[in-house]
Amino acid sequence: MEGMPELRGLHRYPVKSMYRQSPSEAVVEPWGLRGDRRWMVARPSGLAVTQRDLPALALFRAEPEEDGALQLTAPDGRTLRVPAPEPGQPATPAQVFRSHFTATEAEEKAQRWLREVLDDEELRLLHLADPLARTIDPVFSEPGETVSMADGFPLLAVTSASLAALNDWLAAGGGEALPVSRFRPNVVVDGTEAWEEDGWRRVRIGTVTFRAVKLCGRCVVTTTDQESGERRGAEPLRTLQKRRRFDQKAAFGVNLVPERPDGVTGSALGTLRLGDEVTVLARGDRLPAA
């Protein structure tokens, strides 16, 4: 391995399970990248609807605006600007897996548009107005640490070397190499050894430091082509289940929690930029996957 590992990819998902944005830089907030998964589609109960249920969500584009509004584009080109809910709007129950919290419904016009383009009269669009509303699993966090509407943690990191190793396994089995987009990461790190992230404990990207707390247990979303919104068979989940099964999970990638720098009091903890150096500050045994 030559040179210092660096940040090669940076991604955010303004609406949970919709198409990615890949900026050249992004502000890190305690609950995730700024603009990442502050909105989600939900059932009447508040339970999140994701690509696990509707793979076609991958085809919807979402562009956050400076004032908190959201510009949505459906696969057929229909667009809608969704204002951020006004302060003081009634809270509504929301749920991601076993995590229960409160969110705010988007305006009724947005609800009608969403139901029409997804052909489902039960769907709702929810906004996480208060980023302190949802705490991280206390097994993996410090008191008061919160997360957006992501599955469980503020950021997900993967390494190019581990993806290359997985693709070698897939090729050996007669399969095709997969792009990193299948894994919907926030950050992609180049220049490491394959699977070394399994033992990360603390890592610095540019000027921002993170705790590595858990390996990411993967699901059927990894079998979904992020460009077509279609399931593509059993891979890579089948191979991960055979080669990377830890704690009864198929593991790929590592969950990160940002640390607050000394003297920083606001929500902006720092900015990640493509090309930033990545330094592993502490290592340990393999992290748990569940």
Image (spheres, rainbow, N blue to C red):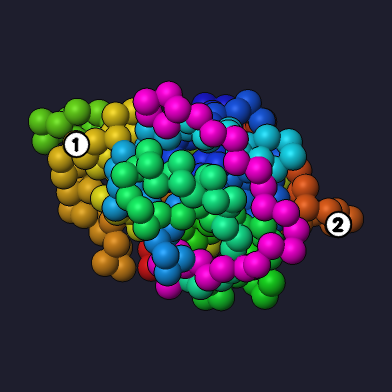
Give the amino acid type for the residue marked by disc 2 in the picture.
Thr
Q: Residue at 59% of width from left, 63% of height from top? A: 103
Left or right? Give the position of 58 relative to 21.
left
Q: Magenta residues? A: 74-98
Q: Position of residue 159 (x, y in %)?
A: 45, 39
Q: Nearer the viewer, mark 1 or mark 2?
A: 1
Q: Magenta: predominant secondary structure element?
A: loop
Residue that mark 2 sits on: 265
Q: Is residue 19 visible?
A: yes
Left or right? Give the position of 246 relative to 4.
left
Q: Residue at 37% of width from left, 57% of height from top? A: 122
Give the amino acid type for the residue marked by disc 1 in the picture.
Arg
Left or right? Give the position of 60 relative to 270.
left
Q: Is residue 123 magenta?
A: no
Are there few (<14), some (14-19), or many (20+) residues within 10 Å of tag 1?
A: few
Residue that mark 1 sits on: 232
Tally of numbered discs: 2
| Disc with the residue nearer the chain's start (1 vs 2) | 1
Are there few (<14), some (14-19), or many (20+) residues within 10 Å of tag 2?
A: few
Q: Are marks 1 and 2 in contact (CB under 8 Å)?
A: no
Q: Position of residue 180 (x, y in %)?
A: 38, 33
